[in-house]
Image: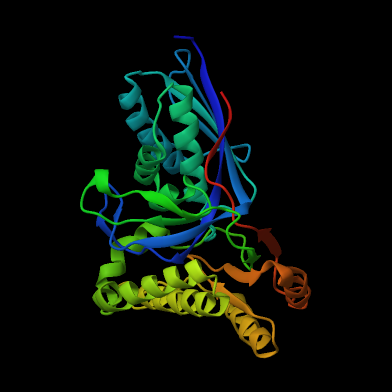
Amino acid sequence: MSQNLTATASAPANIAFIKYWGKKNKKLRLPTNNSISMNLSGAQTMTTVDFSPEYDSDQLTINGYQANERELQRVSSFLEKIRQLAKIKYFARVDSENTFPKGAGIASSASSFAALSLAATAALGLKLSEKELSQLARLGSGSACRSIPDGFVEWVTADTHQESFAYSLYSADYWEIADLVVIVAHPEKDVSSSMGHDVAPSSPFFQTRLEQYLPEATNILKSALKEKNFSIFGQIIEAETINFHAIALTSQPSIMYWNANTITVMQKVKELRESGLEVYFTIDAGPNLHLIVEQTNIERLKQELEKLKDIKQIIVSYPDNGARLISK
């Protein structure tokens, strides 16, 4: 075995069309419901992992800066699982670069832990299947498991680690739609997704969501995906976003991820639809929005959005492949 074991991998963030909110098992990050997502070409994390007997502790940089203690501890705990799999005790240096703001509701933990999973296992010579890699990534960040397979992805809930994983529903080139991430706030969100998951069951509407709303919404969305019915698809993802944020709002404590600019863009989307531009919004756990549109309407939508003064950045993404090894 060589003294230095290094690999680099990239992985996309993903946007969930059917959200996962709440966990059956916090340690294993087993979700309370299935979720469906799309990988984003314009929101990537590239991670290099270097294991060496010369390091006396794990090290982590994010976008060129030394990570804080909480971030380092989370990554180090995850690396420990991989060291145990590989039966090796070397510490690692991890360098991670995002092409988008982290902690603002664009699934930076998803792309980060997906890239970390692939780079770290490759560096140590572990040969994991896509399913196994998805399961491993889930232990770092639940939504990271959806950034492993290609294109449009479903993550299945289960009661055991072995049965909960993500798989590709359709390839990245299946449907010519796009996601315009509209950044209305750069600072990291005040309430983490982890806390949101923890308090989700305290909402009086949580069980109704799980037992009544989500099964039907998921079936309709999968049918719309299969048929490439953009109107029904858009209506479902927008309704699902409202339902998801209603759970956050009615949890104890109440969580409000939106800000005034979020609502301004939501209203703009509805106005654009009324004027004939078919676009729909979905919003993860943060203030920033994902506007879903057919690719032929991207430029028209960008022109309309540029009229709004409080938008800080627009990131255009297409459906993308999942995690990829860059070098070994």
Quarter of the image holding residue 328?
A: top right
Residue in the picture at 51% in, 71% down? 227
Most distant residue in the bottom direction:
274
Quarter of the image holding residue 195?
A: bottom left
Of 168 and 103, the residue lying toward us: 168
**Residue 149's spot in the image, x, y percent?**
47, 47
Residue in the picture at 27% in, 52% down? 26
**Residue 55's spot in the image, x, y percent?**
47, 18
Camera sees residue 27 = no
Most distant residue in the front direction:
227
For the image, the number of numbered tags is 0
The scheme the figure's colours follow is: rainbow
Most distant residue in the left direction:
159
Residue in the picture at 47% in, 45% down? 148
164 shown above or below 104: above
Describe residue 317's horizontal placement relative to residue 121 as left or right: right
Camera sees residue 13 = yes
Quarter of the image holding residue 80?
A: top left
Q: Quadrant of the N terminus?
A: top left
189 shown above or below 250: above
Of 271 and 293, the residue lying toward us: 293
**Residue 44's spot in the image, x, y percent?**
60, 47
Residue in the picture at 70% in, 65% down? 312
**Residue 317's spot in the image, x, y percent?**
65, 58
Describe residue 294's horizontal placement relative to residue 153 as left or right: right
